[in-house]
Image: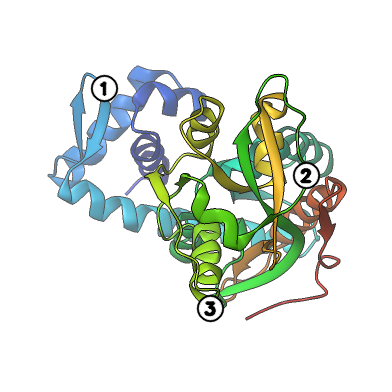
Amino acid sequence: MNLKHLESFVRVAELGSFSKAARLLDVAQPALSRQVRQLETELHETLLLRNGRGVSLTGAGRRLFDHGVQILQRVALAREDLGAQRDTAVGHVTIGMPPSIGRQLTLPLIEGFRQRMPKARLTIVEGLSAHIVEWIASGRADIGLLYSPDAQPALEITPLLSERLCLVQAAVKGRRRSRQGVPLSDLPQYPLILPERHQAIRRLLETQAVRSGVKLHIAWEVSSIPAIIDLVCAGTGCAVLNASAVEASGRQVELTVRPIVEPELTSVLCLAQSATKPTTPLARQSAALLAELVQRRAAPGRSAKTRPGTARVR
């Protein structure tokens, strides 16, 4: 099986599009289509279903995709292991980040990566913390930023940044914005727009509400943080978010942000890596760069949790 053809198939499957994969791999789209067809001919299986919106995996395609991700990862590890003898960052690394922090870090991360690791390649993917945990476990991501993850044997976790949770409301014209804290016991007065239950901040909020005997008024469940902020700005309800999510939206002037108090609720942004996968120079340097950028962006209302590498949970 040709590794080049296998990588082409995996990238098309990941992106759901031949045109997007062709741009990523810097090859002509007809050549990419031929490579995937040759793979299908060799395996006597239809791997992708073509439609007007892109492509989707067949059952056989899904099985090959899982194998392909692992195979390509092992090949990359072999290359990186050889480079490790020279302590040179080579190969490919995939970093997963939540949308709230990804919008702020993507540009400086790419610029820093290009300067410090010019011989390596970087892929950045965005997703909720629960999804990033799955990607690291399956090998689809090498490093991730997670909010308040649970300790688990498969992950090595380094706390980086502590952020207070805040009640986010639409600002009212002509009314002075209050920065006064909102007691947790007052939250039932506000119709809340929250992500689904497995999202880290939602779990943290509901756990503390149960402990305090507070019944939250959850009006809407929306997975997308940008969509939640749009709804808050439109006056549909309120949100519970950290400061970085509001900053990333670029809509601070339309919002009133008040910390939740009595008790204060804090989410911790952590760096996560596989606890079982060998650490390469590329992974070490990428993790150090990511941690450095997070620490650099610490602002009032947030605080550096630890220096990179000083606190680890396994």
Q: Which residue is mark 3?
A: 152
* SS for callout 1: loop
At which x and y percent is residue 156? 63, 73
Q: Nearer the viewer, residue 276 or 136?
A: 136
Q: Nearer the viewer, residue 208 or 229?
A: 208
Q: Is residue 106 visible?
A: no
Q: Which residue is mark 1?
A: 53
* SS for callout 3: loop
- Could you say which disc has been placed on residue 117 in the image? 2
The residue type indicated by label 1 comes to Arg
- Please state which of the two labelled residues, at mark 1 or mark 3, is closer to the viewer: 3
Q: Earlier in the sequence, mark 2 or mark 1?
A: 1
Q: CA distance from mark 2 to mark 3?
A: 30 Å
Left or right, 116 with reference to 189: right
Quarter that holds the C terminus: bottom right
Circle 2 packing at 10 Å, graded few (<14), some (14-19), many (20+), is some
Q: Residue at x 25, y 40 (%)?
A: 39
The residue type indicated by label 2 comes to Met
Q: Nearer the viewer, residue 83 or 204?
A: 204
Circle 3 packing at 10 Å, graded few (<14), some (14-19), many (20+), is few
| Circles 2, 3 touching at the beta carbon (< 8 Å) | no
Q: Earlier in the sequence, mark 2 or mark 3?
A: 2
Circle 1 packing at 10 Å, graded few (<14), some (14-19), many (20+), is few
